[in-house]
Amino acid sequence: MQHQAFLIEGEKSVAELLASDFELETLLVTPKFQEKHTALLPKGFPVEIVTEDELTKAGSLETNNAALAIAKMRPQEAFNWQENPFVLALDDVRDPGNLGTIIRIADWYGLTRVVLSQTSADFYNQKTIAATMGSFTRISPHYVDLEAFLQARPQKVPVYGAALEGENVHKLQLQPSGILVMGNESHGISPAIRAQVTQPLHIPGRGGAESLNVGTATAILLDNFFRNQSF
């Protein structure tokens, strides 16, 4: 990430990018994309029209019949607790696809910030960006020393965490306030972070599956926090 730029590919992701405030460095589009999204194309910016074969060769996708862009990463802003009464925090979530899915889920529930441990996957990884399906434009990542971040939280802010020994989430009346920690795909929440959790949560199951994918578990828990809210 020496150049502080990242790659975006495909019609959906590039269209979302063009509608956002990210700063473009490069934009390659096919005639079909140009015709369909004329209103989104930045005025005065050198847009290069290419064939589908040229576009596929320039990127990482097996096929790309729409667009490819390179944009500048946003600088990480200071975290503001007053603007973020409910926080989703990821502890060592390492798979870019899982991270992208979680970003998309967070966007669905209206979150605009996600806190990540420094060992979590890269927000700007190509697989992460692809899995967000454009939601990367509405979510800001905050990479932190997660243990220190939790220790420095304002007083009385609860910390929820997904755990097998937690309380049945379906029996609780949760409100979107506090911090929800989701853990590593294989090992769950690390011991140091687990020590900061004030309310462990458990998703009860009826079948024989050993566990849930972290993205699926995040969706279920977020839905329980937001289900009584009016949108």
Image: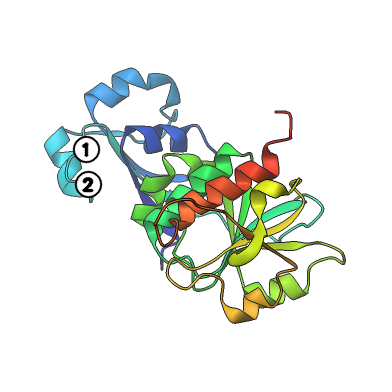
Residue at 21%, 32% in the rendered image: 65
Residue 20 locus on image (x, y percent) = 52, 36
**Which residue occupies the foreground of this view, 114 or 52?**
114
Residue that badge 1 annotates? 64
Q: Amino acid at mark 2?
A: Leu
In the figure, is residue 100 to the left or right of 203? left
| CA gap, disc 2 and disc 1 | 6 Å
Q: Amino acid at mark 1?
A: Asn
Residue at 30%, 24% in the rendered image: 34
* Rendered-image quadrant of the C terminus: top right
Residue 133 locus on image (x, y percent) = 41, 40
Q: Say if 158 sits above or below 117 in the image.
A: above
In the figure, is residue 123 to the left or right of 91? left
**Which residue occupies the foreground of this view, 198 or 94?**
198
The label shown at residue 61 is: 2
**Residue 132 appears in the rendering:** yes
